[in-house]
Image (tube, rainbow, N blue to C red):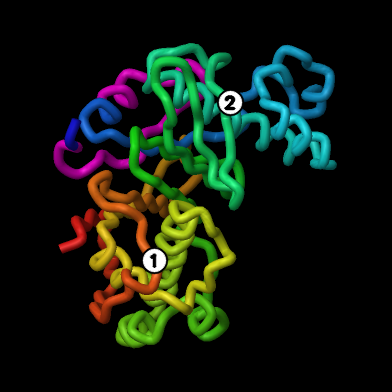
Amino acid sequence: MTPDGPPPSPLPLTGPDGPWRPVRQAYAAHGRVVVHGRWREWLPLDPQDLALDQDLRGMLDERDRRRLRTLPRPAARGRFVASRLLLKHLVAAVSGTAPEAVCLAYEPGGRPYARCAGAGRVELSLSHTGDLLVAGVSRRERIGVDVEASGRPMRYADVGRRLCAPAERAALADLAEPERERGLLRLWTLKEAYTKALGCGMRLAFAEFEFDAVVSGGGWRFTISEVNGDHSAGSHFISSVWRQHECSVGGFGRELVERPRRFGNNRMRVYDGG
């Protein structure tokens, strides 16, 4: 199925009970969907008791059980388990199977994906900040997501050169504060999402590539939304980046073209690579 139009804004979930119908509808229409929710709503018990709950631990694959044992703080363990429950329930909802039948796996660089009977491979991405979890799922394209609190302080003078390519620094320099900080934060989440889609994460220095150039020249699409309200635990920027299914992921150097574009203060922006 060819994706039909721009994808919807990230959809809220309140735990394993969903609501799943809009998620299934978005996935059927576009081949991908992004969701968000608070991690504590995904746990049926207090994080202090996770180590004692065999049924809950049984939902984790062996690699994730090993990872869980390395986390010393109850909150970190709770968020980790909740994130895996979210991913399994999300894949199960869009593929028509049970969460227990979903197997989470990881590429050598750590990029997650899922396999389940009858659905084959499903592409995944996960992000979190504070109490908020964000997950993206895609039928066949690589996908990456990232989330940050929109009020997070980020001074351009401190981090601009580490996060921005020269054309991006020039575009941000034209903005007045505090819009410059918000533009920098939005750009950061987009670059985070892009490198997650690639599977390289922070191993790719953000100042080494111009986001709009790789999107425009490499068959990528992206959205950036600002979600508000009690359910999202305040206001957050949620970015998602995905590869069009007809485009192969080629060498990074071939995607770099000189085509700068400013990152304005739109509530949601959808780019089609044109």
- Horizontal and vertical percent position of residue 27: 29, 29
Residue at figure coordinates x 25%, y 75% from the top left: 261
Q: From the viewer's side, name the closer residue of 231 and 36.
A: 36
Quarter of the image for the N terminus: give it.
top left
Check disc 1 and give the amino acid type.
Gly
Residue 227 visible in the picture = yes
The stretch of residues the image draws in magenta is: 3-25
19 drawn magenta:
yes
Identify whether 44 is placed above or below 269: above
| Quarter occupied by residue 33 | top left
Q: Nearer the viewer, mark 1 or mark 2?
A: 1
Residue at figure coordinates x 46%, y 16% from the top left: 117
Residue 19 visible in the picture = no
Residue at figure coordinates x 55%, y 59% from the top left: 201
| Quarter occupied by residue 219 | bottom left
Q: Is residue 38 left or right of residue 165?
A: right
Crowding around mark 1 (Cα neighbors within 10 Å: few <14, some 14 to 19, many 20+) is few
Residue pointed to by mark 2: 85
Q: Which mark is residue 224?
A: none
Residue at figure coordinates x 81%, y 22% from the top left: 49
Q: Estimate the spatial distance between the alpha carbons at disc 1 and disc 2, rounded to whole Å.
A: 34 Å
Check disc 2 and give the amino acid type.
Leu
Q: From the viewer's side, name the closer residue of 248 and 164.
A: 248
Q: Secondary structure at mark 2?
A: helix
